[in-house]
Image: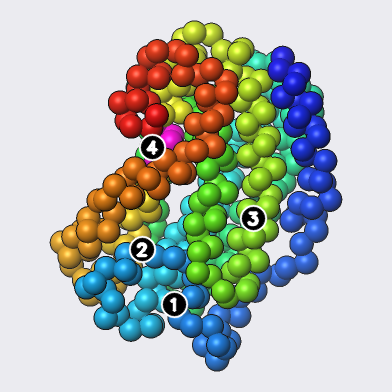
Amino acid sequence: MNSQSLNTYIKTKKDWDKRSSVRTSEETYDLNLDNMDSTNVSDQQFSTYCPILLHEKLKLLDNKQKKFVMGSQLLEFLIKTTKFEVDYVNKVTNNLALGKYKFDIPNILKLDALKIYTDEGYHSYFSKKISDQIMDYFNITSDLMPYVVKFFDKVDNIGSKFDKKFDYLSNLSCVVVSEAMICQDISDEMKGIVYEPVRIMFREHMHDEYFHANYFGTLFKVLWPQLSKEEKKIMGHNLCESMDIFAEPRIDIYFYSLSKLGFTKEFISQCIKDIYDTHEWKVDKAKKKMTQPLKLLNDCGVFEIQSIRKEFENRGFI
């Protein structure tokens, strides 16, 4: 058991009970979007930073169209959050809290898994509440969902080449990676947002996720030494796959939003290629997102296993 990691964890989590949003927030998460049009909030600053709107051929979009593109991207993020928190993170926290894994898990981590279970349920709740309001405001229907499902198809495919009995390593891998990356994801989502109800939601979510990242980082330090050689090689592959998926820019949603504005699939594909097929996006931004999980894996000696190190090197992650 990694007692040093546990001691550090105990010291750094002391404010969790007092400051978790589910325990302290008085927000109703009512966006009042109909009132936004009469405020001084510009359409460009309603939602999230959309790199696609920097494309020369899209700069002629009017403010209403730009707001729709940004709103659709924000909506996609919230819908993913609603599902991921409940179906993926809380699947793992449930297993941890109820002792369903074969590993020796310290009781404090079992107990705190229920804190995360509570937090993530609350994040799922306010993400769903806000996404419902955005859908109503923009008259968006369920025809957006196929663009979200693609992401979860990729997540569900993690570790699929291994025997089903190792599925628990796939679940753990994607959650450890996502929880290590999510603060950076939320920070990116907040760029340019000045509409206060949306900012508050992201700010509260990000604050909670710092505690979650600390938790899952500690959990990984406890679990990794307990894995067999076979499990380590499988989980190493799954971690690599997970980073690849979670570091990808979210571009599928542009095929939805821009097609609704009358653009062809070919035009949208070209715009995406022009913006995202660059060293900045394919290397610099991807590596920035991976900073925390890569440090965690390195600190735990994951890359001392040559087959794992080689896979990460081949993908350009290290």
User: Element type at marker 1?
Assistant: helix
Q: Quadrant of the N terminus?
A: top right
Q: Along the horizontal axis of the image, is 10 left or right of 249?
A: right
Extreme residue toward the top, this view: 229
Q: Which residue is mark 4?
A: 244
Amino acid bearing label 2: Pro
Cβ atoms at labels 2 and 3 below 8 Å apart: no
* Sequence order check, earlier mark of 4 and 1: 1
Residue at image position (61%, 67%) is: 199
C-alpha separation, residue under disc 3 versus residue under disc 4:
23 Å
The residue labelled by disc 3 is 205
Which of the two labelled residues, at mark 3 and mark 4, occupies the earlier sequence position? Answer: 3
Disc 3 on helix, strand or loop? helix
Residue type, label 3: His
**Mark number displayed over residue 44:** 1
Labels 2, 3: front one: 2
List x then y, in percent, for residue 33.
55, 80
The span shown in magenta is: 241-246
Answer with left or right where residue 36 lies relative to residue 111.
Answer: left
Image quadrant of residue 28? bottom right
Q: What residue is pinned by disc 2?
A: 51
Q: CA distance from mark 1 to mark 3?
A: 23 Å
- Under mark 1, the amino acid is Gln
The amino acid marked with disc number 4 is Asp
SS at badge 4: helix
Residue at screen point 70% across, 43% down: 211
Q: Is residue 141 magenta?
A: no
